[in-house]
Image: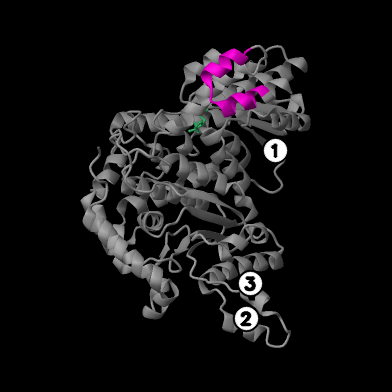
Amino acid sequence: MSTPSISTAIRNSLEILAISDKSTGIKAKFGDDLNRVDRYSLDFGQFYMDMSKTHISQELISIYMEFADEIDFVGKREALLAGERVNNSENRSVLHTLLRDTENQGISMSDDDVLAQAKASKAQFVDQYHQIQGQLSKREHSIKDIIHVGIGGSSLGTQLVFEALKDLNSSIKVHFIGNIDAHQLVDVLSQCELASTLVIGVSKTFTTAETLQNLDSIASWFKTGGVSNPLAHFFGVTAAPSKAHDYGIPANNVVSFPNWVGGRYSVWSSVSLSAALVIGIEKFEEFLSGAAALDKHFYTQNLESNGCFLAAMLDHYYVNFLDVKSRAIFAYDYRLRSLVDYLQQLETESNGKDRQRDGGPVDQQTSPVVWGGVGTDVQHSVFQMLHQGTSLIPSEFILVRDPDHKLIDHHQELLANGLAQTAALLEGQDKAQIDNIHAQDGLTDLAKKAKIFTGERPSTTILLDRLTPKTLGALLAFYEHRTFCFGVFANINSYDQMGVELGKRLATQVKPLLESGQAQKSAEVFDPSTLSLLNKVRNS
Ligand code: F6P
């Protein structure tokens, strides 16, 4: 049995505050405090965040300050920075931030060996980048397509960086192949030509079944096209270089990164080689430096005004004391269309845990469901539920002030919509307002009731001046630190992902049973439902 992760005194204080927050709501907080917007907004330099439309209050912050003392939050933050094995179930440090400390901010507490590893890894990445660029410039056929083969953390961040930062006129397309479902692979290969396609296999472990099988099938496609040893032309990015060599990728084509870079934290490493090849290494360096600026904020700012801490505080308060089950993120920028997928893995794979750090069961709620989409598309689908559904769903609106196109009317409309949604979620619309709006048109009472919006739905707005490598780097680093803070509050290990293993192991047992004649064996191994489904698949 673990010791309680949150003291009775803190729990009681938060429960009492939650009762009051449920009855008074958010709107009243604006009336009580004319400086509320300033008080609860933060300028990170790279972006601005307004939390005033949430349940944040001085009382809430004070309670979390006490909580932070009780759980030695600052000590835990230092332990992370100092390279202690905070990933205790896998006995690993978590030091991906070293890869982006490009301006040597002096916040690193790591020893010289680790710093040397970080530098070497970065140097190898940059070197490989230049080598590939050099080779590409000498090729008879210039590269038009890069196939990036990788899944989860070995792809989601890179795809986001590519989509967010690529020049709209870029002549190189990057295709991200992760899924074992070959419909995607067949589709991508149908768009590529052998002579102008570069393949990069990305896998921290270089053992992931989907990645290896996709690489095999792409190699067959090259062979069919007359290339006798395709693997000799493939590149590999991994923390297990020997595995990539064993697979057949030549040593010169393998770029490694240190084991202390977790999969979902690896966008800062050579995992992003394919995106860097398109956006250019200079922009990639800026992306790293934007993240480093945010690191400095997280590691040096007092907790009372630390944006990562405060955002995580709200996440934790909402799921544990205001019955929240999910959090939604809406990027009002098409270029950030993969942000939600990326953050979903970051937060739910990190904090969707039911064990405390010592292995005992958790005594709190952990990660909410993280979901969302792109504005304004989402307004015509899920926003009905956001405004009038029965669950409280804190949401985040990410807006970019200046676009990188000239269709200013579109952009003004986009921003107007994003801002209007946050106002509508807070304000709602009561019967008197509806009566007023429909005084003349004879709208039925039933229809009027259906138009009631209760309001009081929390939202946070994040405003970027522009979407640049720096602002994107800072934004992703912000979410990483927020994820860390939540893990400390919940006393869980945010850096393992054991929950993905069982299904993978069972899949290796199911696959042979899909072959006919294995019915007897299946019955020994699986439950009646799985057995029945197996039979249906076999008989089809
Ligand atoms: O299945 C989960 C996972 O281990 C993720 O954590 C990881 O990002 C992904 O698979 C890919 O793993 P790898 O980079 O080793 O191929």
**Whether the residue under disc 2 has CB within 8 Å of ligand 1:** no
Give, as a single range, the part of the protein colored magenta. Answer: 518-535
Q: Which residue is mark 3?
A: 450
Q: Nearer the viewer, mark 3 or mark 1?
A: 3
Residue 481 placement (x, y as % from top left): 39, 48
Question: Where 333 sits versus 170, above or below?
Answer: below
Q: Secondary structure at mark 3?
A: helix
Residue at the spot x=54%, y=35% of the render? Answer: 152
Q: Is residue 142 visible?
A: no
Question: Where 395 sits versus 371, above or below?
Answer: below
Residue 426 placement (x, y as % from top left): 51, 71
Q: Which residue is mark 2?
A: 434
Q: Nearer the viewer, residue 338 or 111?
A: 338
Q: Amino acid at mark 1?
A: Ile
Residue at the spot x=57%, y=65% of the render? Answer: 387
Question: Where 250 sits versus 198, above or below?
Answer: above
Q: Secondary structure at mark 1?
A: loop
Q: Is residue 314 visible?
A: yes
* CB within 8 Å, label 2 to label 1: no
Residue 403, by quadrant, is bottom right
Residue at the spot x=27%, y=44% of the render? Answer: 76
Q: Earlier in the sequence, mark 2 or mark 1?
A: 1
- Badge 1 density bin: few <14, some 14–19, many ≥20, Cα 10 Å: some
Residue 332 placement (x, y as % from top left): 60, 59
**Whether the residue under disc 1 has CB within 8 Å of ligand 1:** no
Cα distance between the residues tagged 3 and 1: 50 Å
Q: Which mark is residue 172?
A: 1
Residue at the spot x=42%, y=59% of the render? Answer: 44
How is the model colour-coded? one colour
